[in-house]
Each structure stands twice: as structure tokens, then as C-alpha cells.
Amino acid sequence: MPDPAAVNSMFARIARRYDVANHLLSAGVDMCWRSRLVKTVRRAEPNAILDLGTGSGDVAFALSRGLPEQVQILGMDFCQPMLDEAEIKKQTRHSANVTFQQGDGLALPLADNSFDAVTISFGLRNMGDLKKSLGEMRRVLRPGGRMFILEFSKPYRWFKPVYYFYLRRILPALAQLVTGDRAAYVYLNETIEQFPDRDALSAEIRASGFSDIKACSMSFGIVALHEAVK
């Protein structure tokens, strides 16, 4: 399991270059993944959304652009330097319905049954306790509310050699050039390889009390969007 203190320190180190690194290392495909998430959330017509592990706020702002202005969006992360970057972005964006708050995904400082939707993008694998994190997301959802998990998964078999060569050899070197922190991206690669595949994650979600679980693969299986109902 990831060590929370180490994860917090790592994201604090790369906060200022995090967005640039994401776009470069994914060749811009990360924006397509977020767009797919926003479209899926839009169909649920939520009025209050928690974007957990919001980081620098990209998903929160994308949700704000894709949903009606009256929808309230709370972006939460336990790494304050990442939230500082989100606040800087907010100064130049028309996102009055987006607010940010520091909080731990394993013990959310939020009331039960508070949100219609919870989103988490590429943050679940960094949680120190997967079951506890899923339980907390379920707790703050209203009955009938929906959880959306956008996360790295396992690539299709034919694509594995190419993908893992990129993860292990090319990506850390590029990350070193962009962020100056090769170790952070070696860690991120390791969490990607160790994280459950689509079926295993669906089973974990079901075991946490969710129903109507759907999993959609993207980009040759390297990313999956899971949706589930409380």
C-alpha cells in the first residue's frame, strides 16, 4: 500500500509541473479521458459533486465547463501544494461553482449523504487503503448517487510489451526532463502496474456495497472508467 506521507511529499515536489507533465507524457490523450468522464457524469445530472484527489483541479474545472452553473463542485485533495495550483488556475477561469478544500480520502471531513456524485481521476491507486477509500466515497454519497473512477488499468495483451516498455524506460526519462523528479514517476509507474485490472477493481467496488457497476476501457485498455451506484 502507498505510504500517505511519501505520496503527499512526492506530489508536493512535482505540483508546479504536474499538468505539463501529464499532457506531455500522455501525448495529450489525458484530455480525452477527462472529456469522457465529464460526458458520463453529465448524464447522471448531479447537483452536488465531490472531485476527490482533485490535484490541480483539471477535472473539477472540466466538470464546471460541462455542467450547468448551479451544479456545486468541491475539489478535495490532501496535498496542499496541489490545491495551491488549483487556486491559481481558478483566478483565470469562470468557475464560481468550484471550491477547493484539503482533506484525506481515507477520512473525508464531510457529512454522510452529501453528494449526488463522487469522481476520482488517477488518484485511487495512491490511496493507502483501497477499501477504506471506497467506503468513504460511498458514505458521502446520497442514496442513488453515483461514483465515477477514472484510473489506469491493464492494457490489452497485444499492447502490453509496448506499453510497459514506455512506462519503465521512456516515461521516467521524459519526466526527469519535465519535472526534474525521476523518482516520482518511477513510483507512479509501479502503482500503475500493481493496481487491479478492470474486473478486479469492479469486484472491490461491489464488495464495498455499490451496485450497477460498469467499466469502460479506453486507449487499448490502459485506462478504465468505472461507474457505480450507491
Image (cartoon, helix red, strand yellow):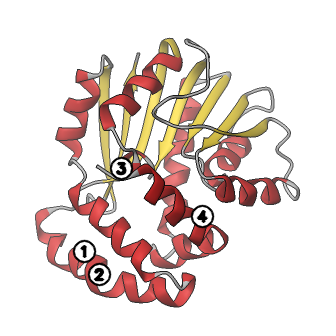
Q: Is residue 220 visible?
A: no
Q: Which residue is mark 3?
A: 125
Q: Residues within 10 Å of mark 2 (few under 14, many from 20)?
A: some
Whole-percent x, y for residue 32 in the image: 51, 59
Q: Nearer the viewer, mark 3 or mark 1?
A: 3
Residue pictured at 52% horizontal, 79% vertical:
24
Q: CA distance from mark 3 to mark 2?
A: 19 Å
| Among numbered discs 3 and 2, the one appearing first in the sequence | 3
Q: CA distance from mark 1 to mark 4?
A: 27 Å
Q: CA distance from mark 1 to mark 2?
A: 5 Å
Whole-percent x, y for residue 17 in the image: 62, 75
Say which amino acid is labelled 3: Arg
Q: Which residue is mark 2?
A: 166
Say which quarter of the image contains residue 73.
top right
- Asked whether the residues under the numbered discs 2 and 4 touch, taking CB atoms below 8 Å apart as contact, a structural biologist would say no
Say which quarter of the image contains residue 91.
bottom right
Say which amino acid is labelled 4: Ala
Secondary structure under tag 1 reads helix
Q: CA distance from mark 2 to mark 4?
A: 25 Å
Say which amino acid is labelled 1: Tyr
| Among numbered discs 4 and 3, the one appearing first in the sequence | 4
Residue pictured at 57% horizontal, 71% vertical:
14
Whole-percent x, y for residue 80 in the image: 67, 52
Q: CA distance from mark 4 to mark 3?
A: 17 Å
| Among numbered discs 2 and 4, the one appearing first in the sequence | 4
| Among numbered discs 3 and 1, the one appearing first in the sequence | 3
As rendered, which of 178 and 180 lies closer to the eye? 180
| Among numbered discs 1 and 4, the one appearing first in the sequence | 4
Residue pictured at 53% horizontal, 52% vertical:
34
- The circle drawn on residue 12 is 4
Q: Which residue is mark 1?
A: 163
Secondary structure under tag 4 reads helix
